[in-house]
Amino acid sequence: MIIFKLLLLLGEKVDLKKISELHEDSREDCILIGTLFKHMMLKPSILKEIAEENLLAPLPPPQDYNDVSDEIVLEDDIQRIKLVGNINVGEMVSGIVCGVLGELN
């Protein structure tokens, strides 16, 4: 809410929307507020560990769990949307509540 009011004070009119209110034909800027979720391909999984214990020798843990295929997703109380653009995914973490300004791509 603070981000929305700040942008209005700067003279820009940007709507605050929910992800479910976005339409593909709309290309106007808007603000979405939600929780970031980082989808990590190298994240440890208990199911992978159990499978490796029963079938294969365990692999050494990686030095870094970040990968180039990681994605950042913004989720609100109903839906999720993938965030793209000038985002350094390696510096992001899950669980941050934030507002993002952009347009539907």
Image: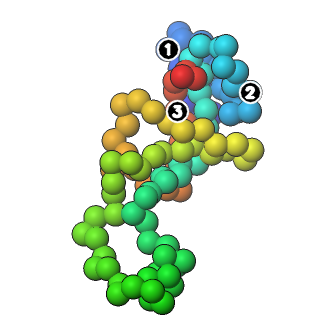
Q: Quadrant of residue 32?
A: top right
Indicate which disc residue 100 carries: 3
The residue mark sitting in front, 1 or 3, is 3
Q: Which secondary structure lies at badge 1? A: loop
Of pointers 3 and 2, the one earlier in the residue sequence:
2
Query: How far apart in space, not on screen, are marks 1 and 3 (Cα)?
Result: 17 Å
Instruction: Report x, y in % for residue 79.
Output: 70, 42
Q: Tags 1 and 2 in contact by the CB under 8 Å rule?
A: no
Residue type beneath disc 1:
Leu
Residue type beneath disc 3:
Val
Instruction: Report x, y in % for residue 81.
Output: 60, 38
Identified at 50% across, 82% down, the residue is 51
Residue occupying the far top of the picture: 11
Of pointers 1 and 2, the one earlier in the residue sequence:
1
Query: How far apart in space, not on screen, are marks 1 and 2 (Cα)?
Result: 25 Å
Residue 56 lies left or right of residue 15; in this view the side is: left
The quarter of the image holding the N terminus is top right
Identified at 48% across, 45% down, the residue is 72
Residue occupying the far bottom of the picture: 54
Q: Quadrant of residue 61?
A: bottom left
- Give the residue pinned by disc 1: 10
Instruction: Report x, y in % for residue 98.
Output: 53, 42
Q: Which secondary structure lies at badge 2? A: helix
Identified at 69% across, 25% down, the residue is 22
Residue 73 visible in rendering: yes
- Give the residue pinned by disc 2: 21
